[in-house]
Image: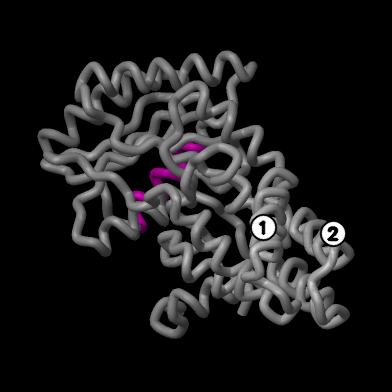
Amino acid sequence: MDWKKIFSPIERLKSGLKKTRDTLTGGIKSILTMHRKIDDELIDELEEALVLADIGVETANHIITDLRQAHRDGRLEEASEVLDFLKRDLKEQLTEKPNVLQLADQPPTIILIVGVNGTGKTTSIAKLAGYLINDGKKVLLAACDTFRAAADEQLDVWSKRLSVDIVKGHTGADPAAVVFDAIDAAIARKADVLLVDTAGRLHTKQNLMAELEKINRVIKKKLPNAPQEVLLVLDATTGQNAIAQAQTFGEAVGVTGIFLTKLDGTAKGGIVIAILKQLNIPVKFVGFGETPEDIETFDADRFVEALFS
């Protein structure tokens, strides 16, 4: 069944954010019904509700500081006005950094996909490939997770389902050599976008990051302005642990955007806001479910409206 034909993006987002909305918005509305005027007790309770939704202490403090200032300035007096204020404040914060996918001036665009095993990385690559194909792009896949045979096999299955070409190496092959060949293939086959899968786990974190840095160097040597994007796949159900992952990968390869998966399986959807505020990395895609259609480009207005609807 093609759910995209049944539900609009906002309805899909509402459905995916149900658990987060029940925790965050349900808690906030419950607090606001018990107060008429804004006072310290109300503000403290709101801050606690924000933290519980995994927006993060730092982000919650920022929002609460804005709320206190608005109250002192006389722009906010009644508890009934707080919800609309929170929505406006969050929308402003979530649009501070552009979340549009960056494409090369001349193809191919190289998109490096990174993330730890278990986050849904391979499925997210398939979703992104499907999204780009629907946008009229010719896509090529590079299977650079050569250390795990299952990763190669999974990506190969998706390439057949999506009818896209894939460049692979044998198990244990040098991932940098695979990406070198994949770039040559992308140019020869006139692909618009090359999606590069990478390992999610080696023997140590240092080994993993060193391998990713090597792949990145090879890409830049072949195409100096590439990769145009380094997308980190994060599992929304991990909450604040996602922040630590983003920091680690960001230091190694300079993450440009987040693909947040499993948003429909968690009450911690507030991590979207925490990632942007604490790391200054925009969320560019969100994923729900397991099919290639279960992907949405991140839109701040839609996200906040779905969160507070």
Q: Of the residues shown, which amino acid type is indicated by label 1?
A: Gln
Q: CA distance from mark 2 to mark 1?
A: 14 Å
- Find numbered disc 1 in the image and state the secondary structure of the residue it sits on: helix
Residue 46 on the magenta span: no
* Point 34% across, 58% down: residue: 130
Q: How is the image coloured?
A: one colour
**Part of the protein shown in magenta:** 151-161
What residue sits right under mark 1 in the picture? 69
* Point 32% across, 24% down: residue: 178
Residue furthest bottom in the image: 6
Q: Are the residues tagged 2 and 1 within 8 Å (C-beta)?
A: no
Residue 162 pos. (x, y %): 32, 57
Q: Is residue 206 visible?
A: yes
* Point 46% across, 78% down: residue: 3
* Camera-nearest residue between 31 and 152: 31
In the figure, is residue 73 to the left or right of 53? left
Q: Of the residues shown, which amino acid type is indicated by label 2?
A: Asp
Residue 169 pos. (x, y %): 36, 26
* Point 74% across, 67% down: residue: 24
Magenta part mainly helix, strand or loop? helix
Q: Which-is-in-front pick, marks 2 and 1?
A: 1
The disc placed on residue 44 is 2
